[in-house]
Image (tube, rainbow, N blue to C red):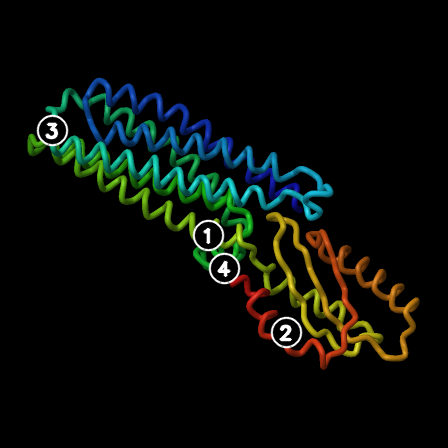
Amino acid sequence: MAASKQGGSNFVIYAALAANLGIAVAKFVAAAFSGSSSMLTEGVHSVVDSLNQVLLLYGQHRGRRPPDEAHPFGYGRELYFWSFVVAILIFAVGSGVSIYEGVVHIADPEPLGDSTLNYVVLAIASAMEGASWFFAMREFASSVRGTHWWQAIRASKDPAGFIVLFEDSAALAGLLIAAVGVWSSQFWNDPRIDGVASIVIGILLGIVAALLAREAKGLLIGEGADPVIVAKVRAIVDARPEITSVNHVRTIHTAPESVFVAISADFQDSLTMGAAEILIEAIETELKAALPMLSSIYIRPERKEDAAVFRPAETAADAGT
């Protein structure tokens, strides 16, 4: 399951990378011939998107390293770090350059040349970005399973999928804005309108970057597993007759498909230490068989009276807030 999901994310990233590299070259050529500010910023946008996909692939590669003494839970959360870097790049480079170019073009407008090439490039770019968006949406939709798309993004622990989806959505919107900017500048014979389009594209990228940064920050700090997983862990442990109470189940994602779980349970007082050890091993085996994403399991025998004070913290942790 994890391997399949990882493979799907990789395909989406590679498809987006191939599309953006080709589109970036075409946009810069069109901008050079027409002098369009919005086309230039769209070229920068595609370059930033390409770099972002490279960073996501790098993050996935680094995150697959096995656990070692320095990082006993592995390196899976390194992908979350690079996802945060991607959000910063979109804001600092993509949004910043777009707004700067727009302001410069408004302050010192240059007459637009023949925009035929612009429209051709925009049409080709829309087709390629649309194909990339389709693959990203199909991959993301397969993991939503009836959940509202925004709730699915908030609950997702794999940033690669929704980052590419956000980027492609912003790219398609940016292409539409650029086309309107070029056409309006020609229709009203006012090149400053093209600069305004560039600023609008920059604001759009800034909004997308802020949303991605918010989601990446939550993953980087540490989010709990899906409540369904937590409930299943609790049910499996609680089903054991030797367990009188499951005090709390605390989880945290150490990678998109890797979860650390800590369980506090009240064992029967008559249970010997040796029997308790055998029971814990049996529970761990059952949990790993039922939930393969549980990479590390910690079960602590603890009296219910001593653990009750931690219940509010469990609610917040398991909800991923």
Q: Which amino acid does label 4 sit on?
A: Thr
Rendered image quadrant of residue 38: top left
Q: Which amino acid does label 1 sit on?
A: Glu
Q: How far apart are marks 1 and 2 (CA)?
A: 27 Å
Q: Which of 69 and 174 is in front in this view?
A: 69
**Figure check: 268 above or below 237:** below
**Circle 4 sits on which residue?**
147
Q: Residue 310 carries which label?
A: 2
Label located before the other in sequence (4 or 3): 3
Q: Which amino acid does label 3 sit on?
A: Asp
**Figure check: 174 above or below 47:** below
Q: How far apart are marks 4 and 3 (CA)?
A: 49 Å
**Circle 3 sits on which residue?**
108
Choose mark 1 or mark 2, whichever is in front: 2
Rendered image quadrant of residue 209: top left
* Secondary structure at numbered mark 2: helix
Side (left or right) of 230 relative to 172: right
Q: How far apart are marks 3 and 1 (CA)?
A: 38 Å
**Figure check: 102 above or below 300:** above
Q: What residue type is labelled 2?
A: Phe
